[in-house]
Amino acid sequence: MSVQAGISCKWTDDSQRFLLEHFDAIYNSPPQIYHSALPFCPSSSWLCKCYAVELSQEVRVVKGLPAEWGGCSRTVSFSYTPLPLACWKCTVAIGTSSNFIVILNTITGSQMAILSGHTGPVNSLVFSPDGISLISGSSDKTVKLWDVQTGGVVKTFHGHTGWVNSVSISADCSMIASGFNDGTIRLWNTQARECHCIIRQGEGIIYVDFSSSDPQHLISASEDGTLQSGILMVTKLDPNMKVLKLHSP
């Protein structure tokens, strides 16, 4: 039983790597399995040994055949420039220089959806912790909240006067932070769907991120090489206070 289990495991592992590595060719034309896929299996793979007779009648690779499977199991090619990436379980979102967002399945690499709505390159992406929402920041000066399941825009946040460099969402999904190159961070209330306040940090903000455990703990990185970390006392803010400073606790 142990030998059979070992063979089964090897067969399963090799088959999965084989299908992922040659997914496009097989998907577009299944007969390509014998002409454009199997001949390029690593020499030590179970598939190469199992189909040795069939491969001897097909194209033979005489030089350059890998001995083992490589570290990359799937390569996806694009006709546009990918910019930021965001992952949640088996889903990856890719922002592009062509103003749209591509949603891919991380296992097969197949395209699940294209999100359109920005009018400038997408500079930053982040999934909500529950994977229900996707937040994007763009050179069109806006932040968008997307419904991942429908691909629709839930809300577009306006207020930045230049490129949005980075976005983040709190662990409880109540706040979105967006950084701008004028040195300010805007906090957006996802329920009220409006700007709650502005935090001024001085130099251009290149990165903002909420703590994964504390929804009021925010970290920012600036162009001057500094890293700021602080607690946002959101519930105690004066509603009339528009510009704040992020201080370390």
Image: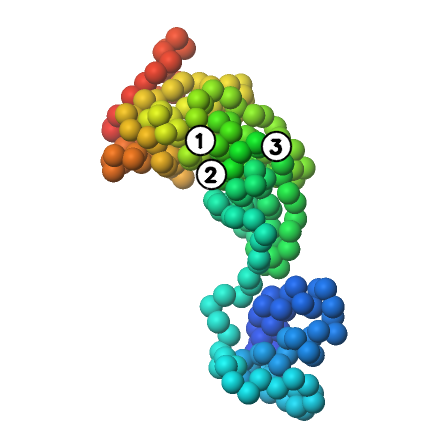
Number of numbered markers: 3
Q: Amino acid at mark 2?
A: Ser
Q: Nearer the viewer, residue 93 or 171?
A: 93
Question: Which secondary structure, mark 3?
Answer: loop
Q: Crowding at label 2, few (<14), some or many (≥20) Cα neighbours within 10 Å? A: many
Question: Can you tell which mark lies on residue 164?
Answer: 1
Q: Position of residue 240 (x, y in %)?
A: 39, 8
Q: Earlier in the sequence, mark 3 or mark 2?
A: 3
- Using the image, determine if residue 79 lies above or below residue 126: below
Question: Which secondary structure, mark 2?
Answer: strand
Residue, x 59% and y 45% (percent of image)?
102
Q: Amino acid at mark 3?
A: Gly
Location of residue 106 by image quarter: bottom right
Which residue in the protein does label 3 denote?
Answer: 117
Q: Position of residue 3 (x, y in %)?
A: 57, 85
Which residue in the protein does label 2 denote?
Answer: 124
Q: Earlier in the sequence, mark 2 or mark 1?
A: 2
Q: Amino acid at mark 1?
A: Val
